Image: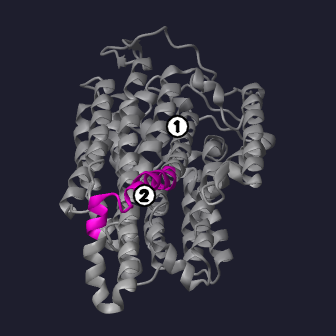
Amino acid sequence: MESQTTGNSGFDANTWQPSHNVWLIAFSVMLATFIEVLDTSVATVSLPHIAGNLSATNDEATWILTSYLISNAIVLPSSSWLSSRLGRKRYQLLSVSIFTLASMLCGAATSLGMLIAARVLQGAAGGGLQPVSQAVLLESFPVQKRGQAMAAYGMGIIVSPLIGPLLGGWITDNYSWRWIFYINVPIGILALLMINAFVEDPPYLARTVGKKIDTIGFGLMAIAFTALQVVLDKGQEADWFGAIWVRWFLAVAAAALVIFIIRELNTPEPIVNLRILVNRNLATGTFMIGLLGVIIYGTTAILPLFLQELMGYDAFKSGYAVAPRGIGAILSMLIAARLIGRVDERLLIAIGILIRGGSLFMLGNLNFSMSMSTIIWPNIVNGFANGFLFVPLTTLTMKTLPRELTGAGTGIYNLLRNLGASLGISMVTTMLVRGEQTHQDVLVTYLNSGNPPYWNALQRLSRFLAIQGGNAEGTHLAMGALYRNLVRQASLCSYIDDFRLLGILSVSCLPFLLFFHNVKQEKKPRRGVTRYSATGPGPSQPRLPLPSRNPR
């Protein structure tokens, strides 16, 4: 076998610099990341149009989203092995090529089955783009400028899902749903050209030529994540544990996941190197990004629903109200990039958590008489928190991880974010339905003749409607109108509960910052050696398991 590692090959992992300008590299990988993340949200507002065009129901059309997420989640943890086996540059070129081809197939689909198959291929190709792009940026930029690298990465990872519903709604209304996939083609070709020209593999990257993949681990991971994703996406429709198939799927997912973890911790060549989670910063950061995934994607999922179902906004107008979140995100990323290295990252993350919680409590004061500006401002504040969360959190999480292990670290880190996102969407959706039923049970007790406000409203409305259909018909219509208003009020209360719970969950992230080591680079390290000092609480970092070094 062939191996190129620090020390054996004469290269120092901490002093290597790429041949091309790091900002050209950042823009190249950001393009690839942008189109991959964009496709997680751009199709959301187009589902009814796709279902009608392909003669499918709305329930069947949701598999367009879930098939993408399932295949994406399965490939994501194995991206470290694949990039190590093929080389990061070659793996990126292959992924972008397949993703672009799959996008063309999605746009040309003539049936729902063909579209789902193309989405599976698209998700599998895009699964490794996020962690590999992140690893390329972390390796290309020097340690003291990694905050700026994460800001560039954040431009693609955070802004694209925010503009996705707005862009998807506009394209669908003005052209065709097929163009939400066709727009990936020119962007993908440009990304291919730039990656081929500017991205390069570092000389110390361990190349696992000839090493076999952990097929058992990959199979267990695929079974666990597929079963779990199906439960998360379809469980609410089947009343969760009320359905036998949900219990069986969840049992299979749990068993496969436990066996997968045991195997990956004991096999010498795991597909997912779980042993690196002994690094305290990495373990803490992956847990926090999973929790933040619940909060961020949960908010993104229910706010457009509120605007369309209760406020009567169309898809484009609701996207327009949510889009300003990207303005806040861009501003905060520019600020955070300059503060990284000057200000303790834990302080920046704490600020982001508090801003996020405050914006969610602002959304917890929604009512039916609000204007669009009442939605826009909390969204700007909500987006402003992103830069203080993602940029310093990613930097601090990877700070104590050896550069040759950044690929494995970013793979696990992004996996937890995706799983948190799936859990968050399922959680808030379930709470909306159950909360609406609970509030209806409470509010319906006021719909009786002994309640003066209800009785007076019923009499006034009955007299008004009796002009058209008589007294009996007027009373019947009035009772129906009042009940519909009650249902809207119950739904509003349920949305308010969700936003406030997400705000509480956001603030609850603060104590986990105490588990981070704040590591600072020494100003004058010995030549060829980068030394770190930990100023955070807790014992020193344990030695990490490095990739195996097999002689030729």
Which of pointers 1 and 2 indicates the residue nearer the eye?
2
Q: Quadrant of the N terminus?
A: top right
Q: Position of residue 528 (x, y in %)?
A: 43, 19
Q: Earlier in the sequence, mark 1 or mark 2?
A: 1
Report the residue marked by disc 1: 413
As shown in the figure, which amino acid type bears the numbered disc 2? Answer: Val
Residue span colored magenta: 431-457
Q: Considering the numbered disc 1 on the image, is that residue within a helix, a strand or a loop? A: helix
Kind of residue sitting beneath label 1: Tyr
Taking depth in this image into account, of 451 and 392 the one nearest to the observer is 451
Q: Is residue 342 above or below residue 537?
A: below
Q: Secondary structure at mark 2?
A: helix
Task: Residue 455: say if magenta.
Answer: yes
Q: Position of residue 401 (x, y in %)?
A: 50, 25
Q: Residue at x 61, y 50 (%)?
A: 73
**Residue at the far right in the pictured view:** 216
State the colouring used for the structure image: one colour
Rendered position, 511 above or below 333: above
Of 424 and 78, nearer the camera is 424
Residue 320 percent across, percent down from the top left: 28, 67
284 sits to left or right of 108: left
Q: Quadrant of residue 335?
A: top left
| Quadrant location of the C terminus in the rendered image | top right
Q: Which residue is mark 2?
A: 444
Image point (31%, 63%), residue name: 454
Q: Quadrant of residue 373?
A: bottom left
Q: Residue at x 60, y 70 (%)?
A: 59
